[in-house]
């Protein structure tokens, strides 16, 4: 999926060095994918070549607010590699068919190939970051990776549970998504000499809002805009915020057994019923609130450019379709 819309705007606001840094990340990612055996070259290469918003590398650069540094580029690539590894594994766990507008690795090549590809991408992420020679950076990425794994496990544990609590849902989103956004901002701050705690908190908040919006997009679609199949969450038993809000508003959904969803068509139908309750607007509003908290919590002492770019990226998180 091409980088368009709000992300392009953020790139402009962040300074003319940002496109150059993102190009360097792209080159590094392609090199990594190409140089570690045929399996990685084929499946990881395809995953990386299929695009993606590259939002996490962008956050690394905006949090750093510095114009150069091989270390910065390696850190950004490492975060994107962890993200890509997680997506490849996530699609196995979620039995997802479409990713970034193309078939998932698990759909195209099976569970074994997808597991190995994800493992390799994880390993290469840490190899890249290790070249920076900073134990603090390794720790940041490793903590985010462990949180991701915990979040994915929690999601499986809660699968098919139509009564999962809002608190448990939010905790899952923190673990599986917000922590990697936090790590991206922390790594940028560490490389750029900024405030890791405050910028990390910003990343964590917008990461949480990002997942809330992703869960809205899973229900709203359309696949042509999201690059993912509509209703994938429900089809796989994953109960998310739109359902949690909709079950309060529609008694038939409150009594609903997610196991009765046995085809993409039925899942889409349930998506329509959720949308009809107004739950998507409420979920969007909650994401917007979190984004506003993120902006309000940005530390003093940022340059005007940095503050503006970070605010724009935060706005983009809740004004997106992909
Ligand atoms: C997808 O992330 C996984 C979630 C955390 C929801 P992105 O929407 O950032 O995926 P790409 O990299 O742009 O494909
Ligand atoms: C994000 O959740 C999981 C990861 C952190 C990879 P989803 O399962 O909703 O992500 P998508 O919708 O498959 O991209
Ligand atoms: Mg998924
Ligand atoms: Mg999703």
Image (cartoon, helix red, strand yellow):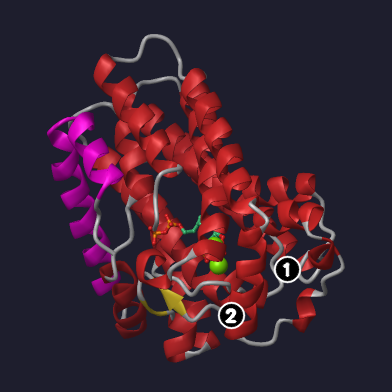
Q: Residue at x 16, y 43 (%)?
A: 19
The answer to whether residue 213 is above or below residue 192 is below
The quarter of the image that holds ligand 3 is bottom right
Residue 274 circle label: none
Image quadrant where residue 65 sits: top left
Q: Quadrant of the C terminus?
A: bottom left
* Residue that badge 1 annotates: 156
Rendered residue at 71%/46% (across/down): 171
In the displayed orientation, state which residue is furthest to the bottom. 109
Residue carrying label 2: 95
The part of the image, by quadrant, that contains residue 53 is bottom left
On the picture, is 206 further left or further right than 101? right
Relative to 305, say whether 72 is above or below. Answer: below
**In x, y percent, where is residue 152?**
65, 62
307 to 319, vertically: above or below: above
Q: Position of residue 5 (x, y in %)?
A: 26, 48
Q: Is residue 36 visible?
A: no
**Tag 2, which secondary structure?**
loop
Closest to the observer, 301 or 100? 100
**x, y percent for residue 249:** 77, 53
Q: Which residues are magenta?
A: 5-34
Instruction: State the residue at coordinates (58%, 72%).
Output: 231
Whichever of callouts 1 and 2 sits on the residue coming sooner in the sequence is: 2
């Amino acid at each position: 999926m091409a980088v368009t819309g709000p992300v392009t705007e953020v790139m402009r606001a962040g300074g003319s060095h940002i496109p150059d840094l993102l190009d360097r990340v792209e080159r590094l990612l392609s090199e990594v994918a190409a140089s570690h055996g045929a399996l990685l070259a084929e499946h990881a290469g395809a995953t990386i070549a299929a695009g993606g918003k590259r939002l996490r590398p962008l956050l690394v650069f905006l949090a750093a607010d510095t114009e150069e540094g091989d270390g910065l580029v390696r850190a950004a690539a490492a975060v994107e590699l962890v993200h890509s590894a997680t997506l490849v594994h996530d699609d196995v766990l979620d039995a997802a068919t479409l990713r970034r507008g193309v078939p998932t690795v698990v759909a195209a090549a099976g569970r074994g190939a997808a597991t190995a590809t994800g493992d390799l991408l994880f390993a290469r992420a840490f190899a890249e970051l290790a070249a920076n020679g900073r134990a603090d950076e390794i720790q940041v990425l490793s903590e985010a990776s462990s949180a991701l794994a915990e979040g994915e496990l929690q999601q499986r544990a809660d699968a098919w549970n139509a009564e999962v609590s809002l608190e448990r849902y939010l905790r899952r989103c923190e673990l599986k998504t917000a922590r990697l956004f936090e790590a991206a901002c922390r790594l940028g701050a560490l490389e750029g000499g900024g405030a890791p705690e405050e910028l990390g908190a910003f990343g964590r908040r917008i990461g949480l809002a990002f997942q809330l919006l992703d869960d809205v997009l899973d229900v709203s679609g359309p696949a042509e805009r999201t690059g993912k199949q509509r209703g994938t969450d429900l089809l796989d038993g994953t109960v998310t915020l739109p359902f949690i809000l909709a079950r309060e508003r529609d008694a038939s959904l409150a009594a609903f057994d997610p196991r009765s969803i046995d085809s993409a068509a039925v899942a889409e139908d349930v998506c329509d019923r959720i949308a009809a309750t107004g739950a998507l607007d409420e979920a969007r509003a909650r994401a917007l609130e979190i984004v506003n908290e993120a902006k309000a919590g940005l530390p003093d002492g940022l340059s005007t450019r940095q503050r503006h770019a970070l605010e724009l990226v935060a706005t983009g998180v809740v004004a997106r379709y992909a």
